Image (cartoon, rainbow, N blue to C red):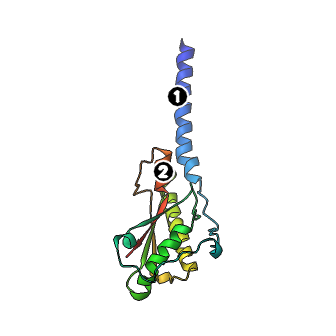
Amino acid sequence: MRILITGFLVFCLWAWLATWWYVNKIKTGIAIPEATTMQVEPLVKDTLEVKVPEKLPLTDEITRTELMHFDFDKAVLKSEATLELYLNKVKPYLDEEPARYLDVVGHTDAVGAMEYNQKLGLRRAQAVQAWFEGQGLAVERIKVSSKGETQPIADNATQKGRAMNRRAEITFK
């Protein structure tokens, strides 16, 4: 019986020491890799021809927030068609009113470290910004920021909810 009790105590001590060592020594030394480059595929003009009247009336449809969704742990635009339509709606107002701008906010799901998600959200917002700049919009007219995982719009407990939270919000202000 003494052997069992001694073995159990040694096991508990070993488990506690191993856990403490991992949390305090090993895990804190792990660096999350930074993204090296941002890949934004060029827009092929032949694939999407959108005819929009020269200037639409300023409505809720134009001023509402547009959402762009991203794949897990990626900051690469999935589709540019939504951005193309949105830019065609707001460009006349941006051209006429110098005080107006686009506010792009990047968001992530709750998977991963909070600091990493904050940076990933910023990279997502910058991917949208790079696309708008590639379309001729001045960098001063686009403000980017990141909320990381702090403002979910869906439940992070489900795969569908996490997919909805991986987004960039574009608001015409």
Q: Which residue is mark 2?
A: 162
SS label for mark 1: helix
Residue 135 pos. (x, y %):
56, 79
Q: Is residue 33 left or right of residue 149?
A: right
Amino acid type indicated by mark 1: Cys
Residue, x 57% and y 64% (percent of image)? 79
**Quadrant location of the C terminus in the rendered image:** bottom left
Q: Nearer the viewer, mark 1 or mark 2?
A: 2
Residue 130 pos. (x, y %):
56, 75
36 or 84, nearer to the observer: 84
How busy is the neighbourhood of tag 2: few (under 14 within 10 Å), some, or many (20 plus)?
Answer: many
| 24 versus 128 height, above or below | above
Instruction: Tell me which corner region of the image, top left, top right, bottom left or bottom right, holds residue 77.
Output: bottom right
**For the residues marked 1 and 2, what is the alpha-carbon distance in whole angstroms?**
37 Å
Q: Which residue is mark 1?
A: 12
Residue, x 53% and y 30% (percent of image)? 13
Q: Is residue 133 left or right of residue 61?
A: right
Amino acid type indicated by mark 2: Arg
83 or 76, nearer to the observer: 83
Q: Is residue 33 left or right of residue 114?
A: right
Q: Is residue 70 left or right of residue 94?
A: right
SS label for mark 2: helix
